[in-house]
Amino acid sequence: MRTATRHTARSPRSGRRSRATRASLAVLAAGALAFTAAGCGGSEDGKSSSGSGGKDGAPSVKLPKLDGQKLQVAAVWTGAEQKNFNAVLDGFEKQTGAEVSFVPTGDNISTFLGTKIEGGEPPDVAVLPQVGVLQQFADKGWIKPVGSTVEDELGKNFSQGWRDLGAHKGKQYGVYFKAANKSLVWYNTAAFEAAGTSEPKTWEEFLDTAETISASGVSPVAIGGADGWTLTDWFENVYLSQAGPEKYDQLAQHKIKWTDPSVKKALETLGELFGEKTLIAGGQKGALQAEFPKSVTQAFAGGDSPDAAMVFEGDFVSINIATDTKAKIGTDAKVFPFPAVGEESPVVSGGDAAVAMKDGKAAQALLTYLASADAAEIWAKAGGFITPNKNLDLAAYPNDVQRDIAKGLIAAGDDFRFDMSDQAPASFGGTKGEGEWKVLQDFLKDPEDVAGAQRKLEAEAAKAYKN
């Protein structure tokens, strides 16, 4: 989900106010533009990094021996993401002798983990895609603070901003192992060439491009509306670019209501796309039936005759393209930054934080490992991954696209905006069929009812933030 897993947002509830200057947004936007120009080929010498570990390939972090100990790790990842994370866990097993099993949680991770805790069988470690869930779990005493070894590894490899995101009320809980740039639009180059159009830079140009592509006989935009989190990402990018960082922070903290005029303006803007069924693959009905992976294949599985020309989502789209289609990134599939709705393109970021749900040496050892460059390197080489770990050798990334995205993330330092819905209580911003996910799905079905969507969003937010 996004995870990644569901572009850069700073958590105002992490106990630290974001500076989020225009300069920081420009840095990341420049990175996004850079990888468009660079394409998606391999590194200049065609080789990947020899490693981010110590001398002679030795591990960069020392871990205890855990022969025979068993750990369970829970996360939302499935498919290729699960496979790649299991490769990371294999690396931990080799270093420590522990046995690690992975449990997929489904989208409703807070409900899944809550049930496990109530049953007295929580996993040793969980990877949380929402900072709001981390904070709720910390308040309930469901997760354990990190030990000194984890703290040391975090201090060595992560900026203060990313450490703050994993902290709550003065205690460190989380390790942000995986990050995401969620302000990207991926496009089928054959569809663009057939329509005689090019990459748009503004929202108006984006809509004009979509109409041109529609006239060529291809649906312009694929939307994975069956997964409500994709719709929150659409809203957040429009809102950040149009309303600006200060308003974004205020709405993320529910310091302004969802009935605010700035929300109305953003929904009306989004409705310019959502309200035109000819611009959406399958129309509104088809979009609401398409899950995120399908939206990617709609744009890239058809070769020169795709079902859609574009799909909006984060850098993790690359793994779906590579796994589920024959399209080649950099030739068949390219990417441009989310178009500027206001003065500049938005950059919204997401991330996944590993937390310990049980006391003990083994859970702390795994968090230490996930905070290291060793663990990040394994997934980075596999693709579909970026990390805020500043000591990972950028050569570990398999292509220039991911390398430039990661470079921009690191260059931004602490000036970034974190995914708004991931900052919210899970019942509002992170639960399938409820809260913001459900209201925005209803809005996609009826984009003319802006006032009704605002009232529902505010009612759901007021209930969630009160609890």
Image: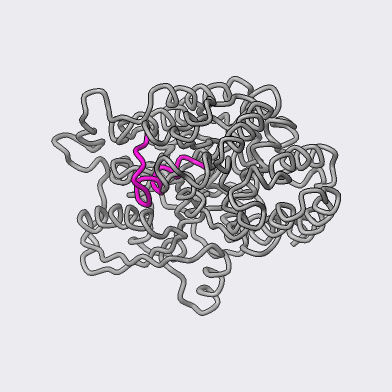
Q: Residue at x 25, y 47 (%)?
A: 62
Regarding residue 156, the answer to whether it shows in the image is no
Tell me if 20 is positioned left or right of 371 in this view. Answer: right
Regarding residue 5, the answer to whether it shows in the image is yes
**Above or below 63: residue 203:** above
**Above or below 25: residue 124:** below
Q: Is residue 323 magenta?
A: yes
Numbered marks: total? 0
Asked where in the image residue 266 lies, by quadrant, the reply is top right
Q: Quadrant of the C terminus?
A: bottom right
Q: Nearer the viewer, residue 147 or 21?
A: 21
Q: Position of residue 254 (x, y in %)?
A: 76, 47
Q: Nearer the viewer, residue 14 or 406?
A: 406
Q: Residue at x 30, y 52 (%)?
A: 88
In this view, the residue farthest toward the bottom is 119
Q: Nearer the viewer, residue 28 or 316?
A: 316
Q: Residue at x 60, y 43 (%)?
A: 419
Q: Position of residue 283 (x, y in %)?
A: 65, 51
**Above or below 250: residue 336:** above
Q: Is residue 310 magenta?
A: no
* Visual colour scheme: one colour
**Above or below 256: residue 445:** below
Q: Position of residue 351 (x, y in %)?
A: 50, 45
In this view, the residue farthest toward the left is 56
Q: Residue at x 49, y 37 (%)?
A: 186
Query: What span is colored magenta in the figure?
Result: 313-329
Q: Position of residue 325 (x, y in %)?
A: 37, 48
